[in-house]
Image (tube, grey):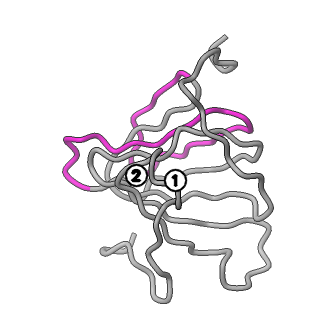
Amino acid sequence: APASFEWAGVALEQYKSDTDTWKGISRRELVGKRGETAKFHVRYFEIQPGGHSTLEKHEHEHVVIPMRGKGEAQAGCYIWTVAVGDVVYVSPSDPHQFRCPADAKEPFGFLCIVNSERDKPTGVDGLGVCHICE
């Protein structure tokens, strides 16, 4: 893993333009923005201590591979502590969120691999009835 978690020619980007549903997270598009023909995109997200991604769902699946620190991965009503060496699979339509604990000593950084053609996520207002846990 790189010591700085920066890649030459890859800009640091804001996570999303909507700022109401997330906190302390940034992203870097590693594969998928520079004319690659791959059927997938690879992004690196980094969440600062106390930060979180949007609680959302979508029809596409994705794979998350932690690269730095420890965090929490939520899918439906399940929450796992994840760290370097773990792999998280998010199924289509699963409400999900990633968090870095407020007392973490370093950011939680992870690779996220998604289909190059994918739908837009929709926010989830609480979890309501969870099809994963029933």
Residue 103 within the magenta-colored segment of the rendering = yes
Q: Which of the 4 image quarters holds residue 90?
A: top right
Q: Residue at x 72, y 52 (%)?
A: 120
Q: Residue at x 70, y 18 (%)?
A: 131
Comes first in the chain, label 2 or label 1: 1
Against 91, is 114 above or below? below
Q: Residue at x 66, y 21 (%)?
A: 132
Can you say which quadrant of the picture contains the N terminus?
bottom left
Q: Type of residue at label 1? A: Ile
Considering every residue shown, the one lying at the far bottom of the view is 9
Residue under pointer 2? 84
Q: Residue at x 29, y 40 (%)?
A: 101
Range of magenta residues: 77-106
Mark 2, residues whose alpha carbon is within 10 Å: few (<14), some, or many (≥20)? some
Q: Type of residue at label 2? A: Val
The Cα atoms of the two marked residues, 2 and 1, are separated by 7 Å
Residue under pointer 1? 65
Q: Are marks 2 and 1 in contact (CB under 8 Å)?
A: no
Can you say which quadrant of the picture contains the C terminus?
top right
Residue 103: x %, y % from top left: 19, 41
- Give the camera-side residue of 97 and 36: 97
